[in-house]
Amino acid sequence: MEKETRREIMEKTRALMEAPTCSSEAKAAAQRWLDAAGTEAEKEETQRYIKELEGDIMPVDMLISFAKSEKGAAYFGAEKAAEVAAHGEEIRAAGAQYCDCPACAIVAEILDKKEDLLK
């Protein structure tokens, strides 16, 4: 991986860890990846990190379905769930594939560099 690409992904990884919507699993995978940088474990941790990120990024259709569900209303509160569903429909209409919360937006940026990460 090129030095500049590594630096960029490391910065995005740190930002992901600070994002309020980042899952604890993604934070842990991000920290393991950062800790493994430059070691023999880096390749294996990179693969684990990518797998975690791919599992955590939320497709916009899933976001909408969740927000419209009883579980979504219980999680967000009824009013906020309706707002989230409407927002999801709005971004889907604009062509978004994924949720645009802080964590998902950063994950999408990192996954755009997936091939570079795997080099």
Image (cartoon, grey):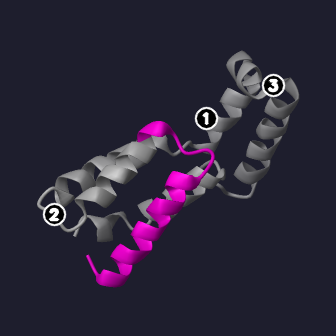
Per the rendering, the mark at residue 39 is 2
Label 3 is placed on what type of residue? Gly
Whether residue 54 appears in this view of the structure is no
In the image, farthest residue toward the top: 70
Q: What element carries label 3?
A: loop
Disc number lying in front (1 or 2): 2
The residue tagged 1 is 62
Label 1 is placed on what type of residue? Met
Is 35 one of the magenta-colored residues?
no
In the image, farthest residue toward the left: 40
For this rendering, which residue is in front, 78 or 85? 78
Q: Is mark 1 on a helix, strand or loop?
A: helix
- The residue under the point 50% across, 64% down is 109
Per the rendering, the mark at residue 77 is 3
Is 31 left, or right, of 42 in this rendering? right
Q: Count every numbered label the image shows and give the total.
A: 3
Distance Cα–Cα, label 1 vs label 2: 37 Å
- The residue under the point 66% across, 50% down is 101
Please provide percent x and percent y for residue 16.
Answer: 52, 56
Is 14 left, or right, of 89 in this rendering? left
Disc number lying in front (2 or 3): 2
Disc number lying in front (3 or 1): 3
> Mark 2 or mark 3: which comes first in sequence?
2
Magenta extent: 1-25
Please provide percent x and percent y for residue 10.
Answer: 40, 68
Whether residue 31 appears in this view of the structure is yes
The chief SS type of the magenta part is helix
Per the rendering, the mark at residue 70 is none
Label 2 is placed on what type of residue? Thr
